[in-house]
Image: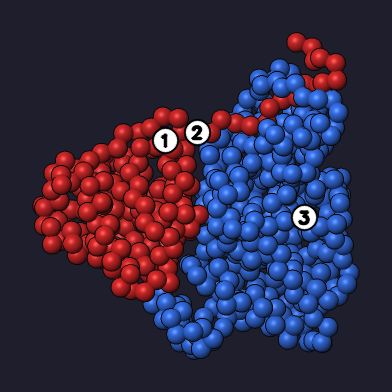
Chain colours: A blue, B red
Amino acid sequence: MSLTSERVEIPADPYEQYERARAERWSDGVPLLPATDAVVAAILAASPYPADHALCVLPPCNGVATVELVAINAAMAGVEPAAFPVVLGALEAMSEPEWNAFGLTTTTSSVFPMLIVNGPCRDELEIDYRAGCMGGAAGRGSMTIGRAVSLCLRNIGGQRAGETTKSVFGQPARLGFCIGEWEERSPWDPLSVRRGFSSDQDVVTVHGGKGTFPLADIHNDDPLDLLYLIAKSLAYPLANPFLGNVENGEIVVAFNPMWAERFGKAFPDVEDLQEYLRDNAYQPIELWPATNAQILRDHGRVDANARVHLFDRPDQFVPIVCGGLGSLHAIALPSFGESQLQSKAVIRP
Amino acid sequence: MSPRANTIQVRRPTAAPAGDTAAPSFTLGRPVAGLTVALREDRAWRSWQLIGDIWAERLRRDGAETVTVETGAQVGRPGSDDRKQIDELARTADAAIVGLGTCGSCTTFTIKDAVAFEQQDRPVVAVVCEEFLVHGQNVARHLGHGDLKILVLPYPLEARPEEELRAIAREYYPRVLELLGVPV
């Protein structure tokens, strides 16, 4: 296999490599593995596309992401060849116009691509979906796939904090965020199946998530009471959807398997649970100071009961099941608003 | 070529940014009287709505017709409706003033919408606050419209008293006309 990207000579010493990568601005600050021809070729051998295939154009600088360039960044992140198609699928999903990559890569918000993987590949690729799946579990797939996507945005898309991206704070997920769903412990169909794929397909879904928003409870015995409070917590007054369009964006809500089991008994049909969340994720208009309240009224956000709902539709609440068995916590991944979840099947050669 | 001792060879991970070519920009070369000038406002920014409304009033005083469109979305049905309105205006208006770039993604979409006018050979000014100027210029360049005319307003505009915003509108109106190519 012949590679066409520029060959660069770097020090063999890993500490000197680290400094060189920082000087070249290839690095996110964490050490990288060397993208030698042998490693890149092995990764490319796992691609369903040829090396010179232009997979997508990545904002903010609109660099062309050839499969070879993506493979180089995946090599630096430590992606194993079998996981490379997940990286490709994620980038393809992010390139769908409704994901709004140009907006998301340049915003002042902390939003970043958060990857959720469904399908049989989760275990094989070490994509974390049990305890510590959002950080700490250290599965190779989770830690390298998300980082490869992040490096592609940096090195191919040209996304650099304070220069081409205006993100005020960024977020830890800018080093990469990739989790699986604990499908076997979910009382509902996996996210991928709900989005039109079959359960034996490997699927990557990309969410423009603003961060990890923790929810905790130990006092509610009734699952409806607990879910009511979760809905209320999702509708925090400074959430992005209250600033923008009620019909755009989704909030992903990750339930631990124990809570999921309780909610599954109350709502065997996930659509009923989504409707319950939609109906209760609101705040009374009196909550907002006068100026904000007037803006919400002007934007038609106040319903006949003087309530301001977070979202317009039940499907904008996206429950998934993952995490450890501590029956105390959920994590919400709030939406940027102007972005729609995108899913792609993982294609293998 | 073999690597020297104590070195290894790797592949460069970076891509060249797009947008080395600059699409043409356009100027009126005449007064605005008798022309239709489009103003793109943004429902998110009340300060800009006020400034845009003042400029529309002044344009009408100078003999132009004005059409104001208020955008507010980037995706979904509302985003699609916004872009349709912009595309329609780009075909029918004689010139346009497009704002406001005062956050990251709203600067991106201000520039994108301004480019839609330039693609129809219309004189256009993108209005961007100082903090987001470099970002706006980057976006314009990467869209292949590096010569897009950008008017820079002070930052931030939000939370200023109304009288200050009115003064800013008055102060910058002649500069908007100048950038549109109205002879002074």
Write down the residue under mark 2: B18
Whole-percent x, y for residue B11 in the image: 72, 25
Observer-nearest of B145 and A58: B145
Image coordinates of residue B21 in percent, x first then y, are: 41, 29
Q: Position of residue A88 (x, y in %)?
A: 68, 39
Image quadrant where residue A64 sits: top right
Q: Quadrant of the N terminus of chain B?
A: top right
Q: Residue at x 37, y 52 (%)?
A: B152
Residue linked to disc 3:
A179
Say what secondary structure mark 1 lies in.
Answer: loop
Disc 3 element: strand
Query: What residue would you read off at disc 1?
Result: B144
Amino acid type, label 3:
Ile
At horizontal 81% and vertical 21% (from top left) the residue drawn is B8
* CA–CA distance in space, label 2 to label 1: 7 Å
Residues A308 and A237: in front is A237
- Can residue B24 be seen by looking at this rendering? yes
- Residue at 87% x, 62% y: name it: A131
The chain holding disc 1 is B
Question: Considering the numbered disc 2 on the image, is that residue within a helix, a strand or a loop?
Answer: loop
Badge 3: chain ID: A
